[in-house]
Image: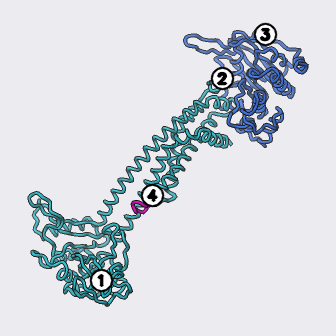
Amino acid sequence: MSSEQPIISCKDLRKIYKMGDQEVHALAGVTLEIKQGEFVAIMGPSGSGKSSLMNLIGALDRPTSGEMWINGKALSQMSRDELADLRNETLGFVFQQFNLLARQDAFHNVKLPLRYARKPIADLDARTNECLEMVGLASRADHRPMQLSGGQQQRVAIARALSNHPRILLADEPTGALDTKTTAEIMELFQNLNKQGITVVVITHENEVAEYASRQIHFRDGQIEIDSANPNAGAALKRAHGG
Amino acid sequence: MKFGVASSSAVEALFSNPLRSLLTMLGIIIGVGSVMVMMSIGEGARALIDQQISSVGTNLLTVQPGGIQRGGRQMGAGGARPFSEADVAAVAEQPFVQAATGVLNGQATAVSEVANWVTNIQGGNASYFTVNNWHVAEGREFTEQESQSGAAVAVLGKTTATNLFPNGDAVGQRIRINSVPTEIIGILESKGGGGGGGMGQDRDDTIIAPLSMVRNRITGGNRWVARHVQRIQFLVQDGYDVMQAQDETSTMIRARRRIEAGQADNFNIINFADMIKQRAAATETMSTLLAFTAAVSLIVGGVGVMNIMLVSVTERTREIGLRMAIGARGGDILIQFLVEAVALCTLGGLIGMAIGWIGVFGYAQVSKAPMVVSPVIIFTALGAAASVGLIFGFFPARRAAQLDPIQALRYD
């Protein structure tokens, strides 16, 4: 494991927001490595900096100082367009509020990243259907978000995140708007995807959710408080089935 | 492929809020409609002028006595001393004159064995036919000798001939014009209505007769001037500047009428082509006014489009953020909103064109003026609409493209 190059690497990341005269240190020096194939849960109270870190890892935002690498490439050296391509090709996002396009059906929502892809893709429609099948919604391809339940919408969003073969799946409170049973279904889906080799990073403040991850990182005041392995990662799955 | 994303989402955006789209398009609709009507009127007027000028000729000048001042009042045209046949000869002798004729006209009642018909009668020299671009369809013109001697012969316009002789065969027959027995020696080729002298008047409803005959039998002589004519018409030779001919003729006539330097002319020289052009200028003015309306409408419409696109960008900030998060580049977003603005304007343009088309035909019905709708007009109108979309859509689209992904995603 130690010889492997980390897929995500952060060095002394700082993010400072100006709120009027005050400076808020959302991230106060974070150094972190995540290896290919890991399932990481990032936890902590609100305002602890976990979302700020997620935005930086997701190439949506730039740090005030520090450097980060994804897949060995330094993000600070990349242009806006290169960051967009990185988000398209390497990263997949899952949001708490799903962020599906309301006027388009599930199929077109899932297809959207493929249509923005710069690399030629053999068969967009086939790949789209494949992704919908992966999340068990092949039969709902022509449904609009409004016609789907919360759990189904989140699964469409996951299919969308998967469509362009990402190496990293980033989920920001993916179950925050879902009930307990649906939460378990979604987390199992993440676990399955992780087993197929996709690196998964989930932000959550629920311990039940974090239990699915093989590594748990706790944030407090913009810094890493605890970074620990979770040997019981499989147990949550069994518990969910048992309950 | 990026264009595909943009166009599908543009159409979708258009129809997701049809009322708003329609209201936004209103300025464009009016603008494009005006462009259509304006260009059609302009081209129609140009066609009409060309037709009129070609029927009259651009080198025809007419000289007539001017009004005279009496006690500060302007008397009507022709109040001054009339011209005589000597003046006609003097005009004709100028080196640049191709042909000249004196003209007398009056009303005449023509009676054949089967009908009678009130029409106008034109007296002229033999060159009257050449000068006025008349051609004889049947029979012959009268000669200069007949013109001078006042022979009782006449050439009939098509309409007059048809009315007097419904069964045809007018040439060689005798009619009485104001009780004077007259032999018909020819029938003119038809010129059709609407051309030359007055719009809407039938130019074929006329009789042309020798100058002396009309003076002796119809209009009567003038108390002060022997062998008078009401006006002189002449053709300027091809290649000679008409304005120059007008100036030289004016100088010559001033000398003949002994008008001293500093005194005003008591005659007018009328350039027919100029008159037509002046009438055309009125149409042109209307066309210009419409062009102005069109430009203003398009600009106002464009601002409306820009406004609604800015609203749309703001409303869809989260959507833009999401599109960026899943890999849309700034350029993709720019194209998406540009295509939307252009689609909005082009659709407005199509509606405007349909309405403009109705306007064009309505105007053509009312004014009887020819209107032309050519492919050039259609492409110009649509091009104008699309350009407005491109120009006024650019600023909102660029604003969308430059949004910060994370701020856009968090916007609510």
Identity of the residue drawn at 37% across and 77% down = B190
Mark 1 sits on what residue?
A: B155
Discs 1, 2 touching: Cβ within 8 Å: no
> Label 2 amino acid?
Asp
Discs 4, 3 touching: Cβ within 8 Å: no
> Label 1 amino acid?
Val
| Badge number at residue A226 | 3
Q: Are marks 2 and 3 on the same chain?
A: yes
> Label 3 amino acid?
Ile
Q: Is residue B88 above or below residue B200?
A: below
Mark positioned earlier in the residue sequence (1 or 4): 1
Chain drawn in cyan: B
On what subunit does the disc labeled 1 rest? B
Q: Colour of chain A?
A: blue
Q: Is residue A73 above or below residue B351?
A: above
| Image location of residue A5, percent across then percent down | 81, 22
On what subunit does the disc labeled 3 rest? A
On what subunit does the disc labeled 4 rest? B
The magenta region covers B364-371
> Label 4 amino acid?
Gly
On what subunit does the disc labeled 2 rest? A
Mark 2 sits on what residue?
A: A61
Q: Is residue B195 left or right of residue B295?
A: left
Q: Quadrant of the C terminus of chain A?
A: top right
Discs 3, 1 touching: Cβ within 8 Å: no
